[in-house]
Image (tube, rainbow, N blue to C red):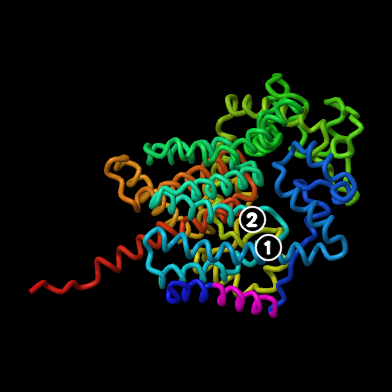
Amino acid sequence: MLARWVMPAVVALAFVLSRILYRALGVGFDATPLSWFWQYIDPELLRSAFGQSIWHLHSQPPLMNLYLGVVLRLFPAHFVGAFQTTFLLLGLAAALGIYFLLVEAGVSPTLAAVLAVLFSACPATVLYENWLFYTYPVACFLVWAGLFWVRFMKQASARDVVGFSACAVATALTWSLFHLVWVVLALGLMVWLRPGQRRRVVLACAVPVAVLLFWYGKNLVMFGQFTGSTWFGLSFSKITNGMLWFEERNELHSRGVISDLSLLPPFSDLDKYGRYVPLPATGIPALDQRLKPSGVPNYNNLAYVTVSRRLGQDAFRILRARPAAYLRGVAESYLTFFLPASVNLFVAKNGRRIRGLTRASEYLSGRFVFAVNRQLRRTDPGAYYVQALSNLGFVLVAIYLLAFAMGLRRLLRGRDRATAADTALLFIWLTVVYGSLAGNLLEVGENNRFRFVLDPLVLVPVAVAIQQWFARRRPTRPRP
């Protein structure tokens, strides 16, 4: 029994030592997003009108703002330290979760410990752990969702279904990318793989799924959209309208294909949108506030529901009228998706403090070119895409292609021929495919940050492939 916990103890010790080292190198927790990030309610409203502001939140799922408000109210003078401690605990939970997930998937404890330590100690992981944003919590939720999934596939315990559905719903209530659709697909796959456990699955996941449905239903009743975030139109406009050339946009507007709103950049402030949409007054500060005290627009203002809906309608018209613009946006999404996760403006401050380690990790990801001339995108598209492709982390591309191929192969085996390892890997395959498609087909921008939350899951098929490769090369003794 004691030997079983040696490797987890090694993972935990390595995590602690790595954080001490990074701290000595100058990495500190960045809580500045609290006051100006678009996704967050004004901190003063979280302090003074907490329940009202969360209830009237429509721009984001509620869990991250709920967490921010609880910390601000419990630790009014030491909230930065509380945020940092929470994220450190999440990091330790993620490291141990990766280890246990790999072991449950059939990977040897030694290899599982090595991979868990490498991932938890790599510079990108540390940069996101020290940044007050929901990317890191979502990565942790997905790891533990994968662990509960694998355990259920092996022993069909109701406790594991509850754990899985709780982690999956927590993910959906933190980041709108992981929509109710993804939760339903995952639970449907679970029932398909274990048809004899249908009743147990339905009963065990009822409460978490009901919470998610309640929030979506609340948004439908109050804001007219059955969703976790009303930003879809704004985000989709970035990958359609945002990819039009100036002349194309004006031509579509002159023909009446798109509205006046689409002549403005997505996520403009209300001083510009106010000429085209009504600015209602509700008496609810979270819905009426135009600017936060930091000077950043309050994108939870009720007017943005109308703005997003109209921009979404324009985006679909652009998709039909100028599909080439959308394809340019998708190309940009995937080119960004396979950049190392450390290439992110928001973590650059800490990144500069460990520049040598960050650059070394980018080399290990297969990236050896670090510049691209974006002006060539229009003047010489061929040269631009050659440059952009050369900036990718080619090891990352290979790892994701391997994960896609292994998952598809297991899915094609069918339910009857699926082994325990097959069923364990199918949730990971589903989530990686869903995240890779939804994140890149619907939005362009920080797509490598989207990929970061999938990276721990991709370790599983990679570890399985490594172990199988060593097993084939190991000489076998002939039987006497």
Residue 15 belongs to the span the image colors magenta:
yes
Determine which quarter of the picture holds residue 461: bottom left
Label drawn at residue 137: 2
Expressed as whole percent of the image width and height from the top left, the position of residue 134 reads: 67, 53
Q: Is residue 195 left or right of residue 78?
A: left
Which residue is found at the position 27% from the left and 67% from the top? 471
Residue, far top: 256
- Give the number of marks: 2
Expressed as whole percent of the image width and height from the top left, the position of residue 24 reads: 69, 80
Is residue 395 visible in the rendered image? The answer is: yes
* Above or below for 92 versus 241: below
Q: Quadrant of the C terminus?
A: bottom left
Dot 1, how many residues are within 10 Å of its Cα: few (below 14), some (14-19), or many (20+)? Answer: many
Q: CA distance from mark 2 to mark 1?
A: 8 Å
Q: Is residue 381 left or right of residue 54?
A: left
- Decide which of 467, 163 is in the foreground and name it: 163
Q: Amino acid at mark 1?
A: Phe
Q: Amino acid at mark 2?
A: Pro
Q: Earlier in the sequence, mark 2 or mark 1?
A: 1
**Which region of the structure is painted magenta?**
12-24
Which residue is found at the position 77% from the left and 38% from the top? 57
Q: Quadrant of the N terminus?
A: bottom left
Provide the major secondary structure of the magenta segment. helix
Give the secondary structure at mark 1.
helix
The residue under label 1 is 87
